[in-house]
Image (spheres, rainbow, N blue to C red):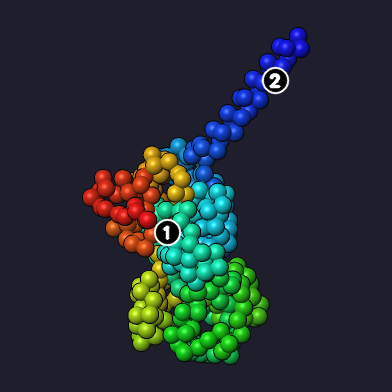
Amino acid sequence: MRNRKKRWGALLALVFVLALTGCGQNSSRMMFGTGGTAGTYYAYGGILAQYMKSYADVRVTAVSTGGSKVNIQSIQDGDFQLGFAQTDILTYAWNGTRSFASEGEIHDFRILGCLYAETVQLFTMDESIKTVADLKGKSVSIGAPGSSVNFNAVDVLEAAGLTVDDIKPQYQSFEDSKEAMKDGKIDAAFIVAGAPTTAITELATTNGVYLVNIDGELRDSILKEHPHYAAYQIPAGTYPKQDEAIETITVEAALLVSAEADADTVYNLTAAIFDHAEDISKENAKGAELDLETASQVTTVPYHEGAARYYAEHGITVNTEE
């Protein structure tokens, strides 16, 4: 009887070990790092997760995070298998520069595809702020230290001849920026996200808000100094009471995947998104920007071989080599 119990115990232990091993290698479950709840990443990520579940047979869980840098680090740590990141930030991570200077190079992720434009949006309720130069001496939210928003804001300020010392910097999230502006605690804020952005829409609806143009010689200077940006126009009517188009700059929002993810799984995830772009666009305006040419434009970081296979079937070659 005692031997039988030992055999059963050993068998159960073996089954438990095998189960754990299977879980460690199983790509049918993935954690997906998005962004703050008031930004585009979170809302859009939830929709994409549903399409990946439905059409790639992968149980994807989209979770709110601190955004690009946290998502890259979490993929490196193995906590996430998918994550959003701006193309400038993922380039810093790959090269170990700027926001990743202290960590060094991170090569644990690959590109699945670029999805939409991440727009640099400078907004205020102060009618006296009409240009970036008018921010001098003002209380301005420029994102958390080391965040993508922070680097974008500094790039814009420097192009306008300002430093962080020339303003009263506040290091706040999208939601905190919205609340602080509503309460009169800050004069302006930078948000970098797909437009329309929830935080700005809510403020524009309840309190009124003005978007500041980043254009002309200022924009030309930024594009020359930092070629990962592109010129962008926010169409009139994107936000309540926004009667005119706003000129600004943009980077791209990319979807990253763990370098260790199974190639067939990543192929299916890619197809789940781009084969259903029209349906996705009905649920989120950013879906209208899903385009294979845009998706395959990153040159600074390699693509996952599973995604590359999908693009190849559509006549597009992307780099998969480090």
Q: Where is residue 244 shown, x and y percent of the image? A: 39, 78
Relative to residue 262, is residue 43 drawn left or right? right
Residue kind at label 1, given as amino acid type: Ala
Number of the label disc, if any, that sits on residue 284: none
Q: Tell me, yes or no, if residue 306 can be seen here.
A: yes
Q: Quadrant of residue 145?
A: bottom right
For image coordinates 58% across by 58% down, the residue present is 65
Task: Give neighbour class at mark 1: few <14, some 14-19, many 20+ (Cα, 10 Å).
Answer: many
Residue kind at label 2, given as amino acid type: Gly
Relative to residue 130, is residue 302 drawn left or right? left
Mark whose residue sits in front, 1 or 2: 2
Q: Is 21 or 246 nearer to us in this picture?
A: 21
Above or below: residue 136 compared with residue 81: below
Quarter containing the N terminus:
top right
| Residue ID for mark 2 | 9
| Residue ID for mark 1 | 254
Q: Where is residue 190 shown, x and y percent of the image? A: 52, 75
Task: Give neighbour class at mark 2: few <14, some 14-19, many 20+ (Cα, 10 Å).
Answer: few
Q: Earlier in the sequence, mark 1 or mark 2?
A: 2
Q: Where is residue 226 shown, x and y percent of the image? A: 39, 76
Q: Is 53 or 148 nearer to us in this picture?
A: 148
Residue extending furthest toward the top: 1
Q: Tell me, yes or no, if residue 48 can be seen here.
A: no
